């Protein structure tokens, strides 16, 4: 009869796992762009010849229901957009600082989006209209 | 000395770090969920704002969208034809800023999809978009 061999307990080295995990966290924290307007439902329009847009601090959105939002907060009308955008870009001197990202649902009628675009222009901002590139 | 009376000495400087990795991975999952890796695309345009001018320069290009149908200087086109026509005009080569202006008017039922495609075509052709509002009629 053979003598029974004692099996050594397998020891997985997990001490460095925490370090790796925290490095990944730091990476995601640095690269993250928190979605401020995740609750706004809209289908962006599609077009060719679009370029990559830089991140800008001011965003105006019009949802599929026709509600107007400034920085993720609902506003009553286009006039409020003019005042709000003017206040937000007041101290900005560069074109990047004066750029407002405009998002609108593709099925929205001109009665809603045209006054908003006009208000952004009246506030003295550049319009960065956001959409999806067609293949 | 009996074993019972012997005081248990705490283990020297041991910090329990076993659960750190669990915690860290939970944070990673959170960041993966909230991270937006999608790049925004579109176009940037400076829309001039001002009062309606009665006299427009003769060279001013005018685009009208009537019920989602596009016309350039009263000639009906689709988006591809419009893009080609605007490229032909070579707007960036025009010296005066007023000559680069493309008047954009929406009449009737116009959806943002059509409006956006026209604005993108003007912008990529180097034109300056000027929104013309539909006349509301005389105020009573």
Image (spheres, rainbow, N blue to C red):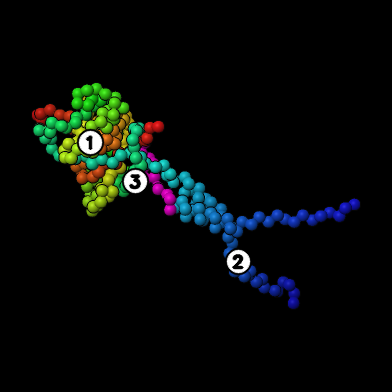
Q: Is residue A130 left or right of residue B57?
A: right
Q: Are marks 3 and 2 on the same chain?
A: no
Residue A31: in magenta span? yes
Quadrant of the rendered image containing residue B119: top left
Of the pair A11 and B63, the residue shown nearer to us: B63
Q: Is residue B62 left or right of residue B9?
A: left
Residue lying farthest to the bottom in this orientation: B1
Residue B91: mark in rendering: 1
In front: label 3 or label 2: 3
Q: Which quarter of the figure is the C terminus of chain B placed in? A: top left
Q: Badge 3 is on which residue? A: A54
Tell me the element at label 3.
loop
Q: Residue under mark 3: which chain is it in?
A: A
Q: Is residue A11 left or right of residue A81?
A: right
Q: Residue under mark 1: which chain is it in?
A: B
**B77, above or below A60, in the image:** above
Quadrant of the rendered image containing residue A111: top left
Tell me the element at label 1.
helix
- Residue A2 in view (yes/no): yes
The range drawn in magenta is A30-44
The mark nearer the N terminus, 1 or 2, is 2
Q: Are marks 1 and 3 on the same chain?
A: no
Q: Residue at x 41, y 42 (%)?
A: B38
Q: Residue at x 28, y 48 (%)?
A: A96
Structural distance between the alpha carbons of marks 1 and 3: 25 Å
Residue lying farthest to the right in this orientation: A1
Q: Residue at x 22, y 38 (%)?
A: B93
């Amino acid at each position: 009869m053979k003598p029974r061999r004692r099996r050594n307990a397998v020891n997985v080295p997990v001490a460095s796992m925490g370090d790796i995990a925290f490095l990944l966290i730091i990476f995601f924290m640095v690269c993250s762009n928190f979605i401020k307007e995740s609750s706004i439902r809209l289908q962006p329009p599609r077009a060719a010849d679009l370029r990559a847009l830089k991140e800008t601090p001011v965003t105006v959105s019009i949802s599929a229901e026709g509600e107007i939002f400034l920085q993720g907060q609902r506003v009553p009308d286009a006039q409020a957009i003019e005042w709000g955008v003017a206040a937000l870009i007041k101290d900005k001197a560069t074109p990047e600082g004066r750029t407002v990202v405009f998002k609108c649902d593709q099925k929205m009628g001109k009665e809603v989006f045209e006054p908003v675009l006009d208000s952004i222009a009246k506030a003295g901002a550049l319009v960065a209209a956001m959409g999806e590139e067609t293949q | 000395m009996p074993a019972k009376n012997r005081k248990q000495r705490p283990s020297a400087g041991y910090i329990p770090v076993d659960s750190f990795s669990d915690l860290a991975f939970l944070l990673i999952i959170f960041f993966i969920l909230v991270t937006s890796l999608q790049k925004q695309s579109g176009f940037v345009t400076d829309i001039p704002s001002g009062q309606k001018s009665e006299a427009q320069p003769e060279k001013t290009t005018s685009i009208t969208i009537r019920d989602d149908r596009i016309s350039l200087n009263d000639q009906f086109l689709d988006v591809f034809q419009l893009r080609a026509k605007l490229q032909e005009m070579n707007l960036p080569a025009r010296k005066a800023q007023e000559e680069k202006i493309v008047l954009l008017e929406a009449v009737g039922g116009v959806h943002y999809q059509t409006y956006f495609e026209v604005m993108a075509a003007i912008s990529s052709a180097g034109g300056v978009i000027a929104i013309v509002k539909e006349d509301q009629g005389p105020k009573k």
